[in-house]
Image (cartoon, rainbow, N blue to C red):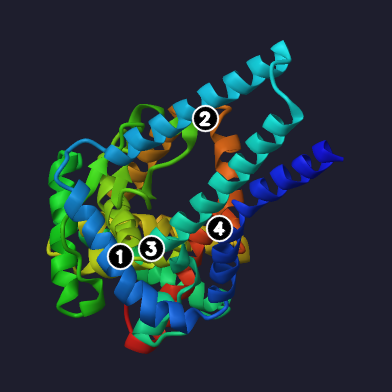
Amino acid sequence: MLQNNSTQLSNKQLLSKLILPLLLVVLIIVLKRFPLLIEDYYSTTIYIKISNCLRILIGWSKISLGDILYAIIGLQILIWFIKIVWLLFKKQTSWYDFRKGIVVIIKKLLWLYIVFNFLWGLNYNRLGIAYQLHIEPKNYSKVEVENLVCDLVDKVNESRRKIGRDSLPVFSYQQIFKVADSAYDIATKQYPFLKHQYSSAKRSLYTGISHYVGFTGYYNPFSGEAQVSTDLPNILLPYISTHEIAHQLGYASEAEANFVGYLVGSKSDNIYMNYSVYMDLYKYAATELFLKDFATSHGWELDSLVRKDYRDIRKFFNKKNNNLAPYMSGLYNQYLLANQQIRGIESYNDVIGFLIAYKKKYGKI
């Protein structure tokens, strides 16, 4: 009887350690049902202060500290797993120790969820850029997509002709990050809510394996750094940079980050930035048009130099094809689905809805 009472007491002590994190998780889940509350009191106030503080504390380092943090955490998990397997193999653990280990894991996962949402994750449930611009991305017709494709053909051709030379110029990633920061400074004059301070865009330490992991850039919510894989065709980096900086400003959804990247990049006085933005957007719009009507295409209207640049980009990625990237993309797709992006990895393409809604209101892109 004494042993049973002791066991019950031990179980209660273990479970009591989960009460606070469970309550906070429930609070977060309830809060996510109030996007206006999140928009007004978190995304545009509390989060901005958190984000600025992280960039002030960590932005000074040229090395990606967030990447180092992930490496340390990954190593700790590996060591812990090996230790557990070893103890089980040697039968040097009791059921109480096993239960205690399970509770510790659950507790850490709960706190990880809490910290993630406090530092950034709640932004997935904000009203966002559509609310700020008073536009309404809705279902759109084939005609609207086709008109958008035609607009983007004109934009991409115009910007490429301004660059002129047959081969695109090549810039260092540091120069591109400065151009992206400058573009945000210019855009802020028209869109004050896009004010971006304390630059913290960095070359990811995982650039060398990015093609296997399947990323071109990502935002680290625990360090506030905008990570960019620089092992890519140079012309892609300006738009990727504005996209990742948009995440720093609290635009969590990939479609929103793409659209904010467009708002910023299109206002830039740097033609290389303009071309980078319009190239990527044309790709999204042309893909969407193809899905609506595979017989309709405007690719033949692209300037010969633009077509050459697209061929060079395709050749680059064809050489980087591997068997691991699709699995990693699948994992990222699950992450997006878990964070209310119902189209998963395809949500990047939802920028088309934002562009069409923006064009309806302002008459142009």
Question: First in sequence: mark 2 or mark 3?
Answer: 2
Comparing marks 1 and 2, which lies closer to the viewer? 2
What residue is pinned by disc 1? 249
Q: Secondary structure at mark 4?
A: helix
Q: In this picture, is 281 found above or below 125?
A: above
Circle 4 residue? 21
The x, y position of residue 227, in whole percent, is: 31, 44
Q: Looking at the figure, which quarter contains the C terminus?
A: bottom left
Label 2: element kind: helix
Residue 340 visible at all: no
Decide: is 288 above or below 134. above
Percent from the top left, x then y, of residue 12? 70, 50
Q: Give, as a three-letter code, the residue at label 3.
A: Ala
Q: Is residue 213 left or right of residue 134?
A: right
Numbered tag placed on residue 257 in the rendering:
3
Residue at left 43%, top 67%? 123
**Earlier-in-chain disc, 1 versus 3:** 1
Crowd class of label 4 (few under 14; some 14 to 19; many from 20; radius 10 Å):
some
Instruction: Report the disc number at residue 77.
Output: 2
Q: Is residue 318 left or right of residue 153?
A: right
C-alpha gap between disc 1 and disc 2: 30 Å
How many numbered marks are there? Answer: 4
Q: Is residue 259 above or below residue 311?
A: below
Circle nearer the N terminus (1, 2): 2
Instruction: Say which of marks 1 and 3 sits in front.
Output: 1
Cα–Cα span, label 1 and label 3? 9 Å
